[in-house]
Image (cartoon, rainbow, N blue to C red):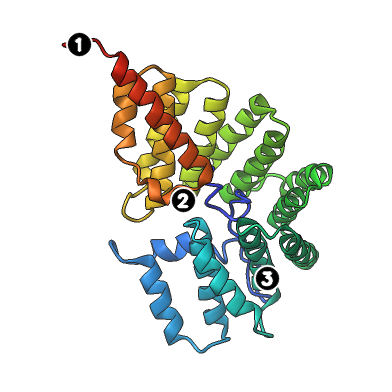
Amino acid sequence: MQLKHLSFFVIVNAAMLCALPLKASEHYSDHELFCFSLPKNTDCLLELQRQLQQQPVGSKDWYKLESYLLDYYYDKIDFTSLKLQAEMLLQRQDVPSVVLAQLYFYYAKTLMHFNQPQQAEAYGLKAAQLVTELYKSFGNPLRLVELANLQKTLGQHDLAVQTLSEAEHRAGNSQDPIFWFELNSNKALITDSTQSFAESLLYRQRALAAILPTEHHVKIVVALGNLARTEQLLGRYKAALGHYQQSLAYMSKNADPQNWSIFHVRLAEIALQLNNPELSREYMQQIDSTLLGQTHRLVYQQLQQKLAQYHKKKPAGV
């Protein structure tokens, strides 16, 4: 999406699905699992913060909730809050290795966001080393997908391809939808980097097929948004429009206003590419431009200019 990807690997945007040392759980830090367990209409962030205050600082449950909170801020693209939370945890000496790997990765992404690439690379390398050790300890192929994502982030594309191939081989006939979602999403990220969008399309379709039957709504949004964006880049505008529209059923403007605005920028852009300025204007009304980053704000401004030209060309009396 460039949701980027709302998940720890995939935006690299995907969650570090880890466990504490005594238990290898593939979904340790996925805040969606926590949020799904809450009563309807409960504010997930407030509940996370409330439960954190009730746990002894440094306890196993406290770190589990902290990992959910990191994942929450990352999925919401709230890098300011993520930076503050990460820097607090980095001061501690008792962080479990799996949480520390997640922490290093998110902090590296945060530093990239704030234009500190050298520091970001240093933390990315630390994360890669820890993820490698975790795979050796648990033998979980999802750890290899995490490692490949880090390798790609560090510019080691050929090595990342090899690591993903090894992960797929080790997974065998695994029925874990998150593994196949992450594997194919990362394959697409690598082919995207060479602008091989036709090949990326296949991986995006596979990622969506894996995650769609689940209740992981954030990941479904990521999968639909990534597929739609790839289709748009390939000129398949009707398909792209349909998949972006489909993603809205899994989103909430109130709960995630930034990504809601980003997706509507793309919807408005595609509607105009389909020569439908009326529909484009409808989507533009859903956008809060103050929430857009530089890239999407530029697209938004260009759309405003183009739609103004359409208005000028409209025949009198029509």
Mark 3 lies on a secondary structure that is: helix
Instruction: Nearest to the eye among marks 1 and 2: give it.
Output: 1
Q: Nearer the viewer, residue 126 or 78?
A: 78
Q: What's the residue type where badge 1 is placed?
A: Ala
Q: Residue at point 38% right, 33% down?
A: 245
Give the percent coordinates (x, y) of residue 258: 41, 50
* Residue underneath mark 3: 98
Q: Residue at point 62% right, 47% down?
A: 182
Local crowd size for mark 1, using a 10 Å CA cut-off: few (<14), some (14–19), many (≥20): few
User: Looking at the image, do the residues carrying marks 1 and 2 touch, with CB atoms under 8 Å apart?
Assistant: no
* Residue underneath mark 2: 218
Mark 2 lies on a secondary structure that is: helix
Q: What's the residue type where badge 3 is placed?
A: Val
For the residues labelled 1 and 3, the Cα–Cα distance comes to: 65 Å
Q: Nearer the viewer, residue 142 or 107?
A: 107
First along the sequence among labels 1 and 3:
3
First along the sequence among labels 1 and 2:
2
Q: Nearer the viewer, residue 132 or 270?
A: 270
User: Looking at the image, do the residues carrying marks 1 and 3 touch, with CB atoms under 8 Å apart?
Assistant: no
* Residue underneath mark 1: 316
First along the sequence among labels 3 and 2:
3
Q: Is residue 191 visible?
A: yes
- On residue 22, the disc is none
Q: What's the residue type where badge 2 is placed?
A: Val
**Residue 108 lies in quadrant:** bottom right
For the residues labelled 1 and 2, the Cα–Cα distance comes to: 46 Å
Q: Nearer the viewer, residue 301 or 9?
A: 301
